[in-house]
């Protein structure tokens, strides 16, 4: 019998990479997808990876509990990966209530659906390093206190604790992965790495003249999404459910990440980069640096891609994409 997995957020970066990984492992993969007249656009990542025809799509929405119960009852999955969210931090100040409904309460809905319709299924919650916010320890681990700095981070914190609570209350196999920033050529254009690599490719090809950024002093611990989805799966293969920080253990400023991209195509960053105060956030997370020791020891997980390798891969992918157009 093939193992079955439900993935919410399957049209996003992580959903696409995780689905490819699970298909290669022989799983049947079901994606809960919110109805939209734009699905032909929304599934572009699945098409990019060549797996769009291998996914079973189920209509459903994290804010509609009945649709989730039906999905779980229909599939009877072995594993459920809850990756869906309003995930762009900057938007969470514009849409705080929607962010709470999907990114926080949506987790409770998904957990309820699993508890009601497939209580033996293993559950993965996509928690976030944003929960550390105003950091309380130089290198953040599973025991570092949280201090969220955005409506997004506040919502993720609820999702994290409700997952822990369902594990402790109902003995569910529910794990939470506290993932630090992870990127790839499939990253949405609104996030800073992809905004940079797309702009650098455009400038190189003569399609753009400048790149505007906000706070380039912010520091992030950036890894590759392809590596990080493997950690999600590893968590669900453990006998005991638990929480894990997934990170590289290296932090870099937005400025230096940007310089890597410009240097790769032989351009000087300072000739093109300008600062737009409108892109600063109402409250910033100045620095994040993860300590992935527990994941290394318990799961045997290690990142395999350096920041330089990832950024150059992203610039090359954007150059290829723009040239093909
Ligand atoms: O910003 C600064 C910005 O939007 C990174 C999400 O996946 O990772 C992501 O959250 C930093 C921030 O990601 C621009 O102020 C400067 O300090 O790429 P980002 P994020 O907010 O760290 C975590 C782990 C998640 O869970 C989230 O879902 O870059 N920055 N100038 C800029 N950021 C953007 N987007 N655009 C700029 O022009």
Image: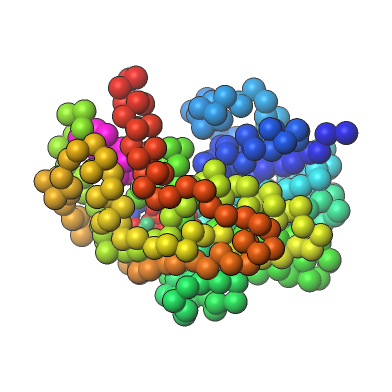
User: Does residue 58 belong to the magenta stretch?
Assistant: no
Residue at 62 percent of width and 34 percent of height: 20
The range drawn in magenta is 194-203
Residue nearer the viewer, 22 or 167: 22
Extreme left residue here? 271
Return the residue nearer the eye: 268 or 283.
Answer: 268
Q: Is residue 125 shown to the viewer in this render?
A: no
Res. 217 image quadrant: bottom left
Q: Quadrant of the N terminus?
A: top right
Task: Answer with the quadrant where ligand 1 appears in the image.
Answer: bottom left
Tell me what residue is drawn at x 64 percent, y 38 percent: 21
Residue 154 lies, in percent from the top left, at: 52, 68
Residue 17: quadrant of the picture = top right
Q: Residue 311, can we see it? A: yes
Q: Main secondary structure of the magenta part?
A: helix
Magenta region includes residue 202: yes
Residue at left offset 62%, top offset 41%: 18
Near-viewer residue (314 or 206): 314
Q: Is residue 199 above or below residue 242?
A: above
Q: Residue 311 falls in which quadrant of the image?
A: top left
**Image label count:** 0
Task: List x then y, in percent, for residue 225.
Answer: 52, 46
Seen in the picture, residue 174 relative to 286 is either above or below; the reply is: above
On screen, residue 48 above or below 145 = above
Query: Residue 81: percent from the left, percent from the top?
Result: 68, 48
Of all residues shown, which one is farthest toward the right? 1
């Amino acid at each position: 019998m093939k193992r079955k997995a439900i993935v919410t957020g399957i049209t996003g970066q992580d959903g696409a990479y995780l689905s490819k990984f699970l298909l290669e492992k022989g799983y049947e993969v079901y994606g809960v997808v919110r109805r939209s007249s734009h699905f032909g656009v929304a599934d572009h990542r699945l098409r990019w990876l060549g797996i769009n025809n291998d996914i079973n799509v189920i209509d459903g929405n994290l804010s509609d509990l009945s649709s989730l119960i039906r999905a779980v009852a229909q599939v009877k999955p072995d594993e459920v990966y809850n990756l869906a969210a309003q995930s762009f931090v900057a938007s969470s100040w514009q849409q705080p209530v929607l962010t709470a409904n999907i990114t926080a309460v949506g987790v409770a809905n998904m957990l309820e659906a699993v508890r009601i319709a497939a209580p033996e299924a293993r559950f993965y919650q996509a928690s976030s390093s944003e929960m550390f916010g105003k950091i309380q320890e130089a290198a953040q681990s599973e025991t570092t206190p949280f201090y969220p700095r955005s409506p997004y981070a506040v919502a993720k914190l609820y999702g994290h604790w409700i997952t822990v609570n369902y594990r402790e209350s109902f003995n569910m196999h529910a794990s939470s992965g506290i993932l630090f920033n992870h990127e790839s050529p499939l990253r949405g254009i609104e996030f800073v790495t992809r905004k940079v690599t797309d702009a650098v490719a455009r400038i190189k090809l003569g399609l753009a003249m400048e790149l505007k950024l906000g706070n380039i002093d912010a520091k992030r611990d950036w890894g590759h999404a392809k590596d990080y989805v493997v950690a999600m799966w590893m968590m669900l293969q453990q006998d005991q459910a638990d929480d894990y920080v997934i990170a590289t253990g290296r932090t870099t400023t937005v400025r230096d990440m940007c310089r890597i991209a410009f240097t790769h195509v032989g351009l000087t960053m300072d000739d093109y980069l300008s600062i737009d105060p409108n892109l600063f956030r109402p409250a910033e997370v100045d620095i994040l640096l993860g300590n992935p020791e527990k994941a290394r020891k318990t799961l045997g997980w290690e990142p395999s891609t350096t920041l330089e390798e990832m950024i150059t891969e992203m610039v090359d992918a954007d150059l290829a994409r723009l040239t093909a157009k």
